[in-house]
Image (tube, helix red, strand yellow):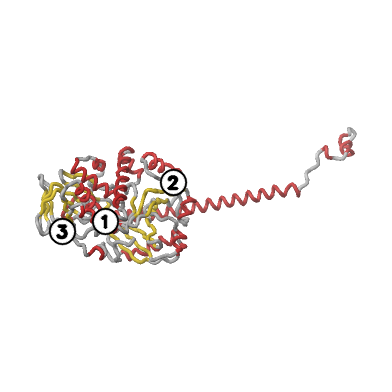
Amino acid sequence: MTPSVTSATNGPHPLPTEAASDLHARLTFDLDVDLCVVGAGLAGLSVALEAAQLGLSVAVLEARRVGWAASSATLGSVLPGYGVPIGELIERVGVGHASDLWALSREGMDIVRARATEEAMPGIALSSGALEVSNVDLGDRLVERLQTLGVDFGSEVEGWQIDRVREVLRTQRYFHAIHFPGAFQLDGRRYIRGLEAMARRAGVRIFEDTPVLGIDSSGIRKRIVTPHARMRASDIVLAGNVHLGAASPRLTRTLLPMWRMAALTAPLGERLAEAIAFTGSIADTDGVDHYRIVGGDRLLWTGPETTFDIAPRRLEGLIRRRIAALYPQLGAVAIERSWSAPIGQTVHGMPQIGELRRGLWVASGFGRHGLSTTAIAGRLIAQGIVHGDQRWRLFDPFELVWAGGKIGRVVGQGVAIAERRTAIASGLLARYRERAAERSRQREERREAANRSVRRVLPEQTPASPTKSDRPVEQRTEAGSPSA
């Protein structure tokens, strides 16, 4: 996989030059359509494609370039679920509701899998499997999670014990794991370009360099104002991220911008296969590290998150230290490229999908689970507009919540740092306990071995006292004489 952003400077950048010759014109004439989609990322293109395939006339307005931000900087992992731990999701909405939401995420995976074929998207570079590894000994909690995911939610999952985890990931830092054999990875940059091509073939009109300056969502026909033209549409979908701005200030204020830095290592040769014998993606349960092998001998690694735009090169040292801590046998690892792009994180951690008011829809706040959730969001909204499908209402409990503005970003940064440090400290404590338990076991084995040795030697070195029947007859007679 070739990373989508090859610069190591601040902020997201346009896609590489192979796509630069295929830029879309800006909107310079008034236009009437059935559906206007604001934002040409994963969510916007998914909605546009699904709606066009259902027969609607669709136009997409993008302020910059197709997939220019987080959508082109994804690690490419396609997994079931959302950014909220399954137990927390059940606490919020109940088992039945959570199970329905989980089923939607699996449907989203099926949509992506059906699209991401080598025939439709050459070079998509599919790989299978995903491991969610624990930094601490899960014990009984592993069985409980497997019960929830496998039995209650019908997911294809496997529980891996410590020995099996360390057989494929040769580090002492991990304990148990949950394996998702149906999960897969792809080249995120090629997927966004493939999605764009599918949308165009379905009749979607895409306009770049066309920011939305204002929206009037009253009335049957909504009005959209851009710098050089106006548009009218029966429905509008706000599918932007933290950059929506004037298109919907209210929605923008509900998203906490999170820059997640990613890096691609230089080729590591055969030593990488000796350290990692798993071709899928690996993520720890605490969200500290997420990585996978790409190109056969490189690591694609996502690391720390910040609520402020920091030059990726300033954070490369953190990723190098994490790689060294997990896999010291790799030696000094060089970072060839690094980049970052903002994701929109909601306060409740779930995506915002649904109808805000009649004809005004939202598909935003996907966080780190963008591929499968944007796919299902596109289908739910398109079918809601065309067929009146109400499945999008499963996301009703997750409303628009103010993210706290600048104070929220400061607090969010503090929470992220605290959670990361807590996770790392918990892992250190777990390994200390494991080593202490191993030392205790070894001492007990040595003590037991010593005891067995003593028991073997004692009968040979210490003669037993003779019993009465073993004494000579003369001694027995004398001892038993009354005169004695």
Q: How far apart are marks 2 and 1 (CA)?
A: 34 Å
Q: Where is residue 372 in the image (x, y as percent from the top left)?
A: 30, 49
In the shown orientation, is residue 225 left or right of residue 144? Answer: left
In the shown orientation, is residue 5 left or right of residue 331? Answer: left
Can you name the residue that lies furthest to the front here?
119
Q: Which of marks 3 and 1 is nearer the N terminus?
A: 1
Q: Which of marks 2 and 3 is nearer the N terminus?
A: 2
Q: How far apart are marks 2 and 3 (CA)?
A: 49 Å
Circles 2 and 1, Cβ within 8 Å, touching? The answer is no
Q: Name the residue under label 2.
A: 159
Residue 210: image tag: 3
Q: Which numbered disc, 2 or 1, marks the residue closer to the eye?
A: 1
Is residue 422 visible to the viewer in this orientation of the structure? no
Q: Which amino acid does label 3 sit on?
A: Thr
Instruction: Characterize the local packing of mark 2: few (<14), some (14-19) or many (20 or more) Cα atoms within 10 angstroms.
Output: some
Q: In this view, does 226 lie above or below 219?
A: below
Q: Earlier in the sequence, mark 2 or mark 1?
A: 2
Q: What residue type is labelled 2?
A: Gly
Q: What residue type is labelled 1?
A: Gly
Q: Distance between the residues labelled 3 and 1?
A: 22 Å
Q: Quadrant of the C terminus?
A: top right
Identify the element where label 1 is drawn.
helix
Residue 194: image tag: 1
Q: Where is residue 224 in the image (x, y as percent from the top left)?
A: 12, 52
Is residue 406 visible to the viewer in this orientation of the structure? yes
Q: Where is residue 350 in the image (x, y as percent from the top left)?
A: 28, 47
